[in-house]
């Protein structure tokens, strides 16, 4: 077959593809078989010895980077505990890498959050879409380490055959364009990397979407109780409710709370992907509560029945802020579409992941002192400042990661300049 050339690309949800996904290169991997029981034993040994290492003393958690690092004491302790072991354990760097992979699998990659177990396999869940990616795997042995942790069949490590970054791939097209509802925040990066201008278009009909408030609680228990009461209030009025969560685990926790409160609802996450169309089709009916991961976020059109429109439309509840406010805006955009009535409400707590990873310790202490009422709620102005600063910090870190990826591409072009002109 002959590819005639990369002439025109039209990218739907352009900011998701060109920006969010661009932190990780596209990798074409081969397959390698596991021979005998040796890989199983190796990963089991790594998990066993890493479980005995003490956090803070032998290893530290890199919260913002979502990584782990052995301390000098940890490297020495690992060497002592594996003395006399054979194979890769003899080499210092190899055993340290094995231990760090095991610590990642144990402490940063959790079932029903970064992955699910389906059909006896570890399947990655896309953090941006909430969908399962059955044909993808983590590299450098991390996927196999998680399989060993979950006691499922260990697949062969997949050697990299070829790799290319999103930036490099899409810049190969002679004409590149795209569409999205949330591009203005990353307009500068789209111009710098892809040489694309962003044009804002007005909505087809005037928006009636209303912001119904932001609530930041000291503890998560108060947050979940407030979410349940908000959902109860809205369905009592005859509206439909969409509760957005960041993970499968959280969606199932909300489901349990709603069941205990006697509120009928439907759950949409990576486990129910086959029923997605039917669940979304019914989400706009009166008194309907739908609990969903990001599967019901970007690009989902929930059609409302006439009684729901008359009662106030779809009410969207955000249960946890995302690292990118563009993803929050995509969730809010499920309500108040095409001129319909609708609104959104935000709930968070100080122990949410984004505020733990990127929140300022000083502002957390101030929030604890200023919280008032029962349940204890942080004043709105301070809550808004904390969320904006955390999301801005996360955005800067991810932008720096993309710049490094882009810079490595340019360096590769320079090193291989003899091979011909680049994009």
Image (cartoon, grey):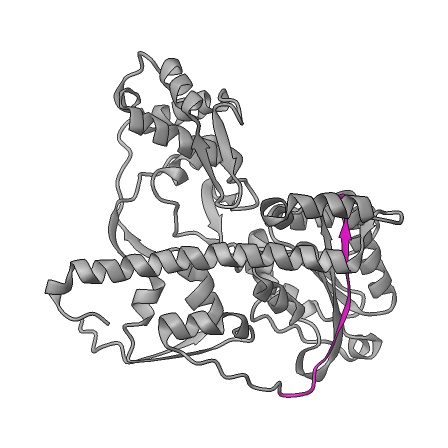
Q: Main secondary structure of the magenta part?
A: strand
Question: Would residue 325 appear left or right of 125 to someone viewing this image?
Answer: right
Q: Quadrant of residue 232 in the image? A: bottom right
Q: What range is drawn magenta here?
A: 204-219
Q: Quadrant of residue 303 in the image? A: bottom right
Establish if 401 lies above or below 196: above
Q: Nearer the viewer, residue 10 or 187?
A: 187
Q: Quadrant of residue 45 in the image? A: top left
Residue at left offset 18%, top offset 73%: 2
Question: Would residue 282 appear left or right of 392 to someone viewing this image?
Answer: right
Residue 179 on image: x %, y %:
48, 78
Residue at left offset 60%, top offset 87%: 202
Residue at left offset 47%, top offset 56%: 398
Establish if 176 lies above or below 379: below
Residue 394 on image: x %, y %:
54, 55
Q: Residue furthest top?
A: 84
Residue 44 on image: x %, y %:
41, 25
Q: Nearer the viewer, residue 296 or 203?
A: 203
Verify whether residue 210 appears in magenta: yes
Question: Would residue 86 appear left or right of 317 to someone viewing this image?
Answer: left
Quadrant of the snapshot with the N terminus: bottom left
């Amino acid at each position: 077959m002959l590819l005639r050339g990369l002439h025109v690309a039209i990218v739907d949800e352009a900011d998701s593809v060109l920006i969010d996904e661009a932190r990780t290169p596209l990798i074409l991997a081969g397959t390698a078989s596991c021979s005998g029981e040796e890989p199983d034993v190796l990963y089991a040994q790594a998990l066993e010895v890493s479980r005995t290492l003490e956090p803070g003393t032998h290893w530290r958690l890199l919260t913002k980077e979502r990584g782990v690092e052995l301390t000098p004491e940890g490297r020495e302790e690992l060497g002592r505990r594996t003395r006399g072991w054979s194979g890769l354990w003899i080499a210092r760097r190899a055993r340290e890498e094995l231990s760090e992979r095991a610590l990642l699998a144990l402490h940063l990659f959790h079932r029903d959050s970064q992955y699910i177990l389906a059909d006896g396999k570890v399947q990655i869940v896309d953090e941006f879409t909430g969908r399962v990616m059955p044909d993808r795997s983590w590299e450098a042995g991390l996927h196999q380490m998680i399989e060993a942790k979950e006691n499922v069949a260990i697949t062969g490590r997949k050697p990299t055959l070829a790799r290319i970054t999103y930036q490099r791939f899409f810049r190969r097209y002679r004409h590149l364009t795209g569409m999205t509802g949330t591009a203005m925040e990353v307009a500068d990066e789209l111009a710098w990397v892809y040489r694309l201008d962003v044009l804002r278009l007005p909505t087809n009909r005037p928006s009636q979407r209303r912001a119904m408030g932001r609530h930041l609680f000291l503890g998560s228990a108060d947050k979940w109780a407030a979410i349940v009461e908000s959902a109860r209030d809205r369905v009592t009025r005859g509206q439909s409710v969409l509760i957005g969560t960041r993970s499968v685990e959280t969606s199932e926790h909300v489901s349990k709370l709603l069941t205990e409160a006697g509120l009928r609802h439907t759950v949409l996450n990576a486990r129910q992907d086959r029923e997605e169309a039917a669940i979304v089709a019914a989400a706009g009916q009166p008194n309907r509560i739908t609990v969903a991961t990001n599967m019901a976020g970007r690009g989902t059109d929930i059609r409302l029945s006439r009684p729901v429109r008359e009662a106030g439309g779809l009410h969207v509840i955000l249960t946890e802020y995302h690292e990118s406010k563009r993803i929050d805006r995509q969730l809010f955009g499920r309500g108040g579409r095409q001129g319909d009535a609708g609104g959104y409400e935000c709930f968070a707590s100080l122990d949410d992941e984004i505020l733990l990873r990127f929140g300022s310790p000083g502002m957390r202490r101030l929030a604890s002192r200023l919280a008032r009422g029962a349940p204890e709620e942080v004043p709105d102005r301070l809550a808004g400042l904390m969320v904006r600063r955390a999301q801005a910090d996360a955005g800067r870190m991810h932008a720096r990661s993309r710049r490094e990826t882009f810079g490595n591409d340019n360096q590769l072009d320079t090193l291989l300049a003899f091979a011909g002109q680049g994009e």
